[in-house]
Amino acid sequence: MLGTMLNPTRPPPVMTVDELQRLLDGAFPGSRTSYEVEEVTSSTARMLFRVDESVSRPGNTVSGPALMALADCAAWIVIMAQIGPVALSVTTSLHIDFLRKPEMVDVEAVATLLKLGKRLGVAEVAMYSVGSDDVVAKAQVTYSIPPA
C-alpha cells in the first residue's frame, strides 16, 4: 500500500507477483532458491533474499556483494512490474550505502520507483534484516531500457 500512498496517480503494475517471479527465475536461473518477489504496487516492490552460508563474510554478517545483488534485483523487479518483461534492460548505475551490520538472517528489500521514462528507470532500494526495522543498506539503481 505504500506505493499507492507515494504516488496515487501512477497506474497499477502490468505484471503480477507470480509473473515477476517466473520472469526472474527464467532470466536468472541461479536465483530460484535465493529471491522471492513478495509484493508489487504502483510504485514499489518487496522482495525476500534467503541468506545462507554462501553469502556470509567474517564477522558473521551478510556480504556486501550479496546486498548489492539484492538491490540490483529489486530495482529490476520494480521496473519490470511497470514496463513488462523487458529482460534486456541493464543496470547503468548502482550506488549503495552500507549503514549497519546485517545479521545472518534473511534480508528484505523494498524498491521504490523514483523515475520511469522511456529510456531510463531509477529506483531506491532499502534493505532490512528480517525482524528489524533498521535499514542495513540503501541503494539507488538506474536501469537503461532498450527501445521497443
Image (spheres, grey):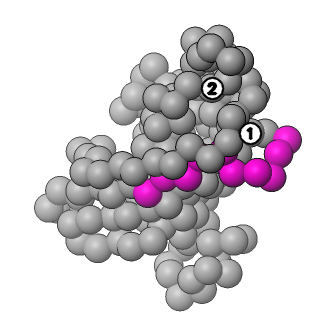
Asked if residue 113 lies in the magenta stretch, the reply is no
Q: Position of residue 101 (x, y in %)?
A: 68, 35
N-terminal of the pair, mark 2 or mark 1, is 2
Can you identify the residue that label 2 sits on? 62
Can you identify the residue that label 1 sits on? 129
Q: Which mark is residue 40?
A: none
Q: Is residue 92 visible?
A: yes
Residue drawn 46% across and 48% down? 96
Residue drawn 51% across and 31% down? 64
Decide: is 10 above or below 59: below
* Foreground pick, 84 / 106: 106
Q: Position of residue 147 (x, y in %)?
A: 14, 61
The reply, left or right, for residue 50 in relation to residue 28 is right
Decide: is 123 above or below 103: below
Q: Is residue 84 visible?
A: no
* Quarter of the figure that contains the N terminus: bottom right
Asked if residue 137 lies in the magenta stretch, the reply is yes
Secondary structure beneath dot 1 equals strand
Spatial CA distance of label 2 from label 1 is 10 Å
Residue drawn 71% across and 18% down? 60
Decide: is 53 above or below 144: above
**Over which residues does the magenta segment extend?**
131-140
Residue 18 position by quadrant: top right
Residue drawn 59% across and 16% down? 57
Q: Residues within 10 Å of mark 1 (few under 14, many from 20)?
A: many
Q: Of all residues shown, which one is farthest toward the bottom?
A: 9
Query: Hey, what amino acid is under mark 1?
Result: Ser
Query: Tags 2 and 1 in contact by the CB under 8 Å rule?
Result: yes
* Quarter of the figure that contains the C terminus: bottom left
Q: Position of residue 78 (x, y in %)?
A: 48, 57
Q: Position of residue 146 (x, y in %)?
A: 17, 56
Query: Hey, what amino acid is under mark 2?
Result: Val
